[in-house]
Image (cartoon, grey):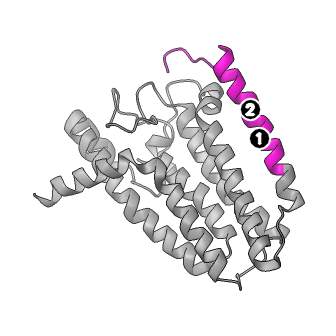
Amino acid sequence: MALIEEFDKTGNWLFRYRTYLPLVLYIFATLVIFLDKTPSFSHLDPVAIGFCLAVSFLGLVIRSVAIGYVPRLTSGRNTKKQVAEVLNTEGIYSIVRHPLYLGNFFMWMGIVLYIGSWWFSLTIALVFWLYYERIMFAEEYFLRNKFGVTYLDWAGKTPAFIPRFRQWSRPGMEFSFKNVLKREENGFFAAVLSFAYVDFFKNLVLFNQFKLSLFWIIVTAVSFVIFLVIRFIRKKTSLLKVQGR
């Protein structure tokens, strides 16, 4: 098999199972917390908590900007195959080709940084790049075959992962906060639970305390209520239905 076909095949396989990556991260994060009992900073330090939350929140904002302007049948949560009825080149897609994966990177790096191991953080950053590089290759291979010159013109001037802000092009549609709410409820709550998990396990390993810190009890409780409210509205009402998306 030619290398280009092998990259495409591997990328599509990783694309289908990309939702399981966090489970692997949980396993390795748990091992690191258990084995490395001299973290670079305390997980109870308010400055550290604020910084790590800010990194993850930046990722959530990036994803929200992308999703809020996304046309129908693009950038979805589909796992069986690539889907793109239109090539999205406006808004955040005018400055970076893979904003959702960029958002994922920051969301998960905030959690990884909170573990307090710099070598583990650097390792995860490298693994993230290698993992998503194949997925991005497969997506771009699909888009190139489908949109041809239009795709090549856009890709030729738009960076894959590091935004070029001066190229910002105003989206041709209105921002849909409803679309963000109904598509990011799970990711938002999963991120909060991940922070809480790190705090709980660190308290257990470092202090032999079977508890969750008060701050994370409050944050998790509030997040859970928000999650339930959004889930109820999405499942039981039509308030979050968006025409044409």
Residue in the foreground of this view, choosing between 216 and 165: 216
Segment colored magenta = 219-245
Q: Is residue 156 visible?
A: no
- Residue 115 at x, y percent in the picture: 67, 71
Q: Inspect the magenta stretch and tell me whether residue 1 lies in it.
A: no
**Residue drawn at x 45%, y 70% as measured from the top left:** 126
Q: How many marks?
A: 2
Q: Badges 2 and 1: C-beta atoms under 8 Å apart?
A: yes
Around disc 2, counting alpha carbons within 10 Å, would you say few (fewer than 14), some (14 to 19), or many (20 or more)?
few
* Above or below, comparing residue 127 to residue 34 in the picture: above
**Residue 64 disc label:** none
* Above or below, comparing residue 63 to residue 175 in the picture: below
**Residue drawn at x 34%, y 37% as measured from the top left:** 80
| Quarter of the image that includes the N terminus | bottom left
Residue identifier under label 2: 228
Around disc 1, counting alpha carbons within 10 Å, would you say few (fewer than 14), some (14 to 19), or many (20 or more)?
some
Q: Is residue 86 visible?
A: yes
- Residue 72 at x, y percent in the picture: 44, 24
Residue identifier under label 1: 224
- Residue 203 at x, y percent in the picture: 79, 71
Residue in the foreground of this view, choosing between 221 and 153: 221
Q: Inspect the magenta stretch and tell me whether residue 221 lies in it.
A: yes
Residue in the foreground of this view, choosing between 99 and 21: 21
- Give the residue type at disc 1: Phe
* Side (left or right) of 115 relative to 26: right
At numbered mark 1, what does the secondary structure look like: helix, strand or loop?
helix
